[in-house]
Every structure is written in C-alpha cells, then in structure tokens.
C-alpha cells in the first residue's frame, strides 16, 4: 500500500493528519525536534554535526521534515553578498507531536506559531547560533573521539526553569573526556556588551553558589584575544571559578587546549576543557541533585544506537 501523502499546503492538524505524519518519523527525527524546541534555532550545518554525517542526506531529510510541517526555515540577510545557511526552527506539526508525546499542550511547551518569524527578526538570533555552535562542536568531537562525551546541554530557557532568577547563563554543559569531567555554565560573548557589565554577571553566579551550596565554573567564550585580555584585567578577584578562551580555529574547538583559568600563574599553558576541573583544587565542584547531567532530555540522543543514524540518512 503506498504511503499516505501529506499536502504541501499547511494541513489541518487533526488526529488523522498527526497520525500520518507521525508514521513518517524516526526516533532520530524526534530528537531533532526536541533540540529545536529547547535550543530555538539550528543551522543545516549544526544539525548535520548533531545527527548526520554528510551534507546530502542532511538536506534530504530536512527537506522531508519541512514538507511534513514538522520544521520550518528561514535565511538571514547577509550584508556582504552571498547567502547564509538555512536556519531551522520547530514547526507547528512538530510542536503538536512533541506535545502529544509529552502528554501536554503546545502552549505548555512554550511554542508559538510565529516562532520562526520572531527568531528571524531578533537581534539575539546570532548570539543563539553562537551558543549552539559551541555545543554542536562538542557533540561532533564526542562522536569522533574515543572516550569523549557531551553529557549535558541545557539551554538558557532550561537553566532559567531550574535556577530561576538567581543566574541566567547562556547554557549549562557537562563534558567528559578520558575519565575527566566538568560541569560548567557558558557565557558566550559577542563583544556587544561592555566588559564591566560582563564582569557584573559574576555576582549572580556567586549568589547561586551560595544558595545551592554548589560551585560550578563559569566559562567565557570570547571573540578575540584582545577582549579576553581586557576582561581578565577587569575581573580582579572572584569567588567563582572562571576560565576564558577565544573562539579559535583550533582543530579541537572548545574541547581543546584553549582555556585559561582565572587566576593563572605567569606562563601557564592553556588547558583542555575536561582538564579544567583540576584548575581549582581548593574547590569542590558539583552539580545540582535536582538536575543531574545524565537526565537531560537534550542529550538523550547520546544513548541512541548508531543504527538509527544510518536509518535516518537512508530515508
């Protein structure tokens, strides 16, 4: 029997339509939809690094999901010619299916039909893409490095739901490599904020540590070595463990030896991300018992069998 066809126009989201669309989705597709729900917008390249291996299968599968109205897309305007990559956002049918699977409603998911439009015109979308680049790079390294794993990736929204107004990190992560592991809050800096305001954020992290009795390092991912130097000069003393790095072209990306703890001794070499946990031996670093890294819905793809990846690329 031939597979039921989904009309190209926006369908009516009734039970029959949802059942027909759901029959076309793989477990990996649902993981992709969950990532778009939590992390708002991901480019084609980022989705390839998370869920696929080659560009052609990536574009083919995203095209199918787009026709099923589970995801939608836009291309940002570029000032110097050329074209930006497709930016993908959760679509209406995708939100409906995630709500059904979670036994909740689309509204309770926090999804709005105008989400793609609001993200495309937001001046913060570039910042979000930068944060997502950081973590998709880590996941890509984990997929291709024995003994490495991205154990958690919580979005700004997820962090807010856990820690409330005590601190508002851009993301929370947990990275392990060769038996070493570190939890961290990420501050992705684009250079648009004064260094004084960037440094002022540390007060909220100190409040969070005092309230939860859990010390978590804060990592500043900066756009240039000059800005890194100036920020380290502004932050003269802090109760929170801090490390800085520049968004470099290092082969290992943020997982590699690009991190410099604060304070640091003269001539101290930069450290790999997983090694940072040893940079503050006088501190006991830990995670909130209410949110262990291994329970993050955003990283449940880590437990999926690799055959699902092959299945998804063949469809």
Image (cartoon, rainbow, N blue to C red):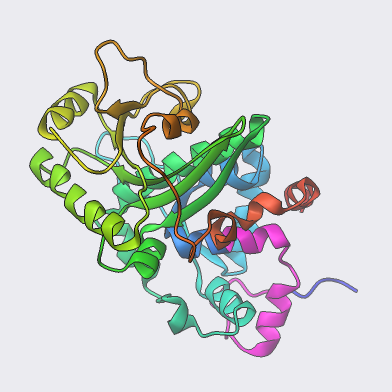
Viewer-closest of 68 and 123: 123
Q: Residue at x 66, y 60 (%)?
A: 29
Q: In this picture, is 76 found above or below 18?
A: above
Q: Quadrant of residue 221?
A: top left
Q: Is residue 307 left or right of residue 102?
A: right
Name the spot of residue 121 as percent of width and height, x first.
Answer: 27, 59
In this view of the protein, can residue 200 be seen by the observer? yes
Q: Quadrant of residue 177?
A: top right
Q: In this picture, is 259 found above or below 300?
A: above
Q: Quadrant of residue 104?
A: bottom right
Q: Give the magenta range.
A: 6-33
Name the spot of residue 255 as percent of width and height, x first.
Answer: 48, 30
Q: Residue at x 77, y 50 (%)?
A: 305
State the quadrant of the C terminus: bottom right
Residue 188 part of the magenta-drawn span: no
Viewer-closest of 41 and 12: 41
Q: In this picture, is 3 found above or below 181?
A: below
Name the spot of residue 295 as percent of width and height, x first.
Answer: 58, 61
Q: Residue at x 35, y 49 (%)?
A: 215
State the quadrant of the N terminus: bottom right
Residue 26 part of the magenta-drawn span: yes
Q: Is residue 125 left or right of residue 102?
A: left
Name the spot of residue 69 as percent of width and height, x first.
Answer: 56, 70
């Amino acid at each position: 029997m031939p597979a039921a066809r989904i009309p190209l126009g926006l369908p009516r989201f009734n039970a029959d339509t949802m059942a027909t669309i759901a029959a076309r989705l793989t477990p990996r597709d649902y993981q992709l939809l969950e990532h778009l729900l939590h992390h708002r917008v991901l480019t084609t390249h980022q989705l390839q690094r998370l869920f696929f291996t080659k560009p052609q299968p990536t574009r083919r599968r995203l095209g199918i999901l787009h026709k099923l109205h589970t995801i939608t897309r836009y291309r940002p305007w570029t000032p110097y010619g050329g074209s930006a990559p497709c930016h993908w956002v959760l679509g209406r049918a995708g939100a409906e299916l995630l709500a059904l699977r979670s036994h909740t409603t689309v509204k309770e998911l926090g999804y709005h039909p105008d989400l793609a439009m609001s993200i495309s015109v937001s001046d913060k979308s570039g910042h979000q893409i930068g944060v997502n680049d950081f973590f998709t790079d880590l996941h890509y390294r984990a997929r291709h490095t024995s003994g490495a794993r991205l154990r958690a990736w919580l979005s700004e929204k997820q962090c807010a739901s856990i820690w409330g107004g005590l601190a508002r990190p851009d993301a929370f992560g947990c990275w392990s490599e060769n038996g070493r592991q570190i939890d961290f809050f990420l501050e992705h800096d684009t250079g648009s904020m004064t260094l004084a305001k960037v440094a002022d954020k540390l007060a909220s992290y100190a409040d969070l540590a005092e309230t939860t009795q859990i010390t978590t390092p804060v990592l500043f991912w900066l756009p240039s070595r000059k800005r890194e130097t100036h920020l380290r000069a502004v932050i003269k003393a802090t109760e929170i463990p801090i490390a800085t790095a520049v968004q470099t072209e290092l082969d290992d990306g943020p997982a590699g030896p690009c991190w410099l703890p604060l304070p640091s001794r003269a001539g101290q070499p930069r450290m790999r991300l997983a090694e940072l946990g040893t940079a503050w031996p006088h501190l006991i670093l830990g995670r909130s018992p209410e949110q262990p890294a291994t329970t993050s819905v955003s990283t449940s793809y880590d437990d999926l069998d690799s055959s699902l990846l092959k299945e998804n690329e063949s469809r």
